[in-house]
Structures are given as structure tokens and as C-alpha cells.
Amino acid sequence: MDTPEKKTSVLFYTDWAKPLRSLPMEDVGQLFCAILEYTETGAVPQLDSPVAAMAWEFIRQRLDASIEKWDATREKRRQAGSRGGRQRAAHLEAENQVEPPADGPDSDGQTQANQANATFAKQTVANQAVTVPVPVPVPVPETENVPVPVPETVHETVPVSETIPAGACAPEEEKETTQLEQVWTQCGYDGAAQAARMLARYREKGLEEGLILEAIRQAASHGARSPLAYIGRILDQAAASGQLTLAAWQAAHRGGGGGGKRVDRPSPSGNDFLADAAARPRRHKRKG
């Protein structure tokens, strides 16, 4: 009969199936017997076939890992069992501990009576009283209604220049920035604050605010997919040509808007396909 300390089972892995199928059945049988013998006795088998011996080395590594894991599990169970046994023995010893009888003529009978009535013992000594402090209200003398002086509030006038931090925009400039954001939003574009920050550099170049607003409207009217790039081309061309005001830009573009032509290129082509088609004479097909 196998003792509990001996491993009586073996774990086979499915990844062994593919290499074993490629071996002859005789080698497979030798490997199977080698696995059982190695697990039971630990003896290393001697295989005749070199291919089977090579396959055995791979199988042996998995078997050693499985055996080590089993030994660790068995040790943990043994330690847990020994700890549980010691705790149970200590608990039983504490329950069975009995106070030795006192000397006297009636000690034997009294001891038996005490043991019999041990579970029915009642408390005969009152619990010690606990003192709880109780707050006593202290009478407060009534005082006459004395008016409390209220400090006067002094309103100081602060100059407007002191309320604006360094580097911030003046109220007039904030109004222009707000107008730019309103026009940007009315044209159906998002990100008005970011656009205002990006277009602020054109004001630094000296371009008039009205010209920047007109460039935004031009981008919306022509359906520009990239409005900032479209507006940038208009303003860059205006700055390069010295057209810093809206009036100068409109005069250079024949009444404003570039005559209805796109300005998102270095120079407008001026081609009007529909107008050219209307001006061309019609061609009639010959009959017969």
C-alpha cells in the first residue's frame, strides 16, 4: 500500500501530444513507462532510441516542476495541520482546567457540588457604579441692552489704471477682441478665443481691426475649409502690399471682396467658367 508521503499520480500535458505522435509507438510506450517509473521512484530511465532520449529530457523538466510544486503544497498542508492541532489542544486544555479543592472536612463534597453547579453560577457581586458627570447650568446675569458701535464703511476710489494688471488688455482693446469673437461666432466657426489670440499678431503688425473682421467674413462667404489659413493669406497679402486699413484694401480690390473671386492663392486667376460658357456661341447640329 502506498504511504501518504509518496506521490501516486502524475500530470500529463497536452503540449506533449504533437511531438509524441511523430515517434514510433515503441518509443512512445518506453516514454510512458519512463514517466510512471520516474514519478514513483525517481530513477532516471535508460532509453535506447536517441530521439526518445531527447524527448525525455523535455518531459523530465515538466515532471520535476510538477514534483516540486507538489512537495511545496504538501509542506504547506503539513504546517497548517500542525498549527491547527496545537491550537485545538491548547483550547481543550483550557476548557478542562479545574481549580484544585481546598483543605477541609467537606472539601470532597464541596468540590463535586461546585463542578456540578459551575454552569449555573450567578453573579452575586453588584457591578461597580460608574460616575457620569452631569453638566450644571450656570446662571448668566442679564445685561442691559447696550448698543454695539458699528464701524463706518469708507469707500475709496481706486483709479482704473491701478485695477488693470500689467500685460492685460485695456478696456478699449477688450471691446475690439470681443467684437472679433462675436464676428467669428456669427460666421459659424468654433474656437473664437483661440482665433482671437492667433489673429492678434496682425494687429501688432499695424493692420486695422475692420480689415481683420472683413477677412473673417470673406472666409465665411467663400466657404473656406481652413478659415485661419484663408484669413492669414488675405492679411499677409494686405500687409505685404501696404494695405493696412479696410478702405485701402477695398480700393485695391475693386469695391471690396476681390470682385467675388477667391483670394486664397498668390494671385486670383480671374477665370469665370460660367460667364465664359454664356458668352460662347451655341453650336447647332447638322441635320441629315
Image: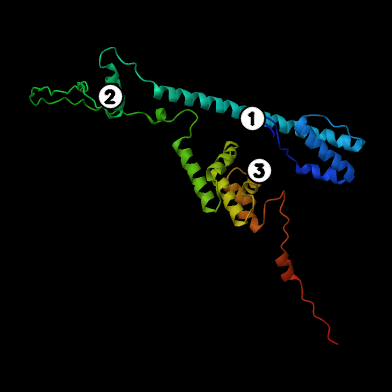
Query: Which mark is in front, 1 or 2?
Result: 2
Q: Residue 167 placed where, x, y %?
A: 50, 29
Give x and y (percent) for residue 61. 78, 32
Cα separation, mark 3 vs mark 1, equals: 83 Å
The residue carrying pointer 1 sits among few (fewer than 14), some (14 to 19) or many (20 or more) residues within 10 Å by Cα, namely few
Left/right placement of residue 154 relative to residue 88 reads left
Up/down of 223 relative to 27, above or below: below
Q: In which quarter of the image is residue 36?
A: top right
Query: Which residue lies under the disc numbered 2?
Result: 113
Displayed quadrant of residue 68: top right
The kind of residue tagged 3 is Asp
Residue at 84% across, 39% down? 31
- Camera-nearest residue between 283 and 255: 283
Left or right side of 16 for 136: left
- Crowding around mark 3 (Cα neighbors within 10 Å: few <14, some 14 to 19, many 20+) is some
Amino acid carrying label 1: it is Arg
Q: In which quarter of the image is the N terminus?
A: top right
What SS does tag 3 mark? helix
> As shown in the figure, which amino acid type bears the numbered disc 2?
Ala
Tell me the SS state at disc 2. Answer: helix
Mark pair 1, 2: CA separation: 49 Å
Which dot marks residue 74? 1
Find residue 236 and name its label: 3
**Of the two numbered discs 3 and 2 in the rendering, the one whose residue sits closer to the viewer:** 2
Please name which of the two marks, 3 or 1, marks the residue nearer to the observer. Answer: 1
Q: Which mark is first along the chain, 2 or 1?
A: 1
Give residue 280's position: percent from left, percent from top. 76, 71
